[in-house]
Image (cartoon, helix red, strand yellow):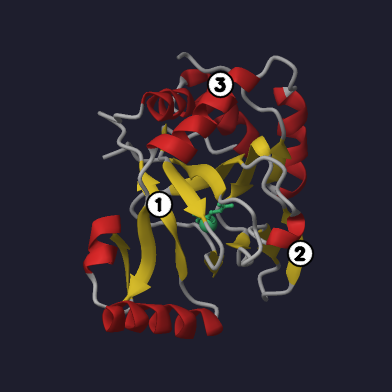
């Protein structure tokens, strides 16, 4: 599968919008049949680790690691996650890091290659003004009820991230289910929030303060996305 932008979107218009506030989002970004294939991969072929903060260190537990923990060990992790979150720290969500060289899930490999294509990288360079962007990292994420990612910025010293992207693959998401990409002013005052869509792209400068709000217990489906950063360093 060779991905491409949906012909109906205007990249120039998105470039102009980004200039206002270093943020832009667009629906129907990929050709619909390609978005459908990626959704199938995210919902049926991807096994997600649990990303969380354990003993004050961000880490990932595989499904089997999680299942091999005793009840009290899981409760301890849950308690730490909740205590951190009460102070606005930490996260818990499903995460699958795409391998840049040998990604085995074909549709996700195609997506990662497309994100690193000249077409996409040169557009993001133009849109953001960051001429030093040379690569895009990528991870698949799944937020299920009770999961969240607290307020943060995405700057990263060694990766030299410039622009964050979120490609959402969530059909008929109800905004009351949470899982919103919430933006904040620097002092923590909430700004606007973007609900996840299907085949929808959000792009924002890594200095924007943001979070993924708590996915409520009554959300009827997981929130799937492919996210990452356009960066000035090569992928490992
Ligand atoms: O999934 C999203 O909407 C944002 C994810 C995010 O902020 C991150 O991974 O740093
Ligand atoms: Fe982020």
- Would you say residue 133 is visible in this rendering? no
* Quadrant of the drawing holding the C terminus: top left
Above or below 126: residue 213 = below
Q: Which residue is label 1 attached to?
A: 95
The image quarter containing residue 107 is: top left
Q: Helix, strand or loop at disc 2?
A: strand
Residue ID at (71%, 32%): 15
Residue ID at (49%, 76%): 89
- Would you say residue 64 is visible in this rendering? yes
Cβ of mark 1 under 8 A from ligand 1: no
Q: Helix, strand or loop at disc 1?
A: strand
Rendered location of residue 37, percent (x, y): 52, 24
**For residue 34, which numbered disc appears in the image?**
3
Mark closer to the observer (2, 3): 3
What whole-number distance in Å separates the C-alpha atoms at marks 3 and 1? 21 Å
* Quadrant of the drawing holding the N terminus: top left
The image quarter containing residue 146 is: bottom right
């Amino acid at each position: 599968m060779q991905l491409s932008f949906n012909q109906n979107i205007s990249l120039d218009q998105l470039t102009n919008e980004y200039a206002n506030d270093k943020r832009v989002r667009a629906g129907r970004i990929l050709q619909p049949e390609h978005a459908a294939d990626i959704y199938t991969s995210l919902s049926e072929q991807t096994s997600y680790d649990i990303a969380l903060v354990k003993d004050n260190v961000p880490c990932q537990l595989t499904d089997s690691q999680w299942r091999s923990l005793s009840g009290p060990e899981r409760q301890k992790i849950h308690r730490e996650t909740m205590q951190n979150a009460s102070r606005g720290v930490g996260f818990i969500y499903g995460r699958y890091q795409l391998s840049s060289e040998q990604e085995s899930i074909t549709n996700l490999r195609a997506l990662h290659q497309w994100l690193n294509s000249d077409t996409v990288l040169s557009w993001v360079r133009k849109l953001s003004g960051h001429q030093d962007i040379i690569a895009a990292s990528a991870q698949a994420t799944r937020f299920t009820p009770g999961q969240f990612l607290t307020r943060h910025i995405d700057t990263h010293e060694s990766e030299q991230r410039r622009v964050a992207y979120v490609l959402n693959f969530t059909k008929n998401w109800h905004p009351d289910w949470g899982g919103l990409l919430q933006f904040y002013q620097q002092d923590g005052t909430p700004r606007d929030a973007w609900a996840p869509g299907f085949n929808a792209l959000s792009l924002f400068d890594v200095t924007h303060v943001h979070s993924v709000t708590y996915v409520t217990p009554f959300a009827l489906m997981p929130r799937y996305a492919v996210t990452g950063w356009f960066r000035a360093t090569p992928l490992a």
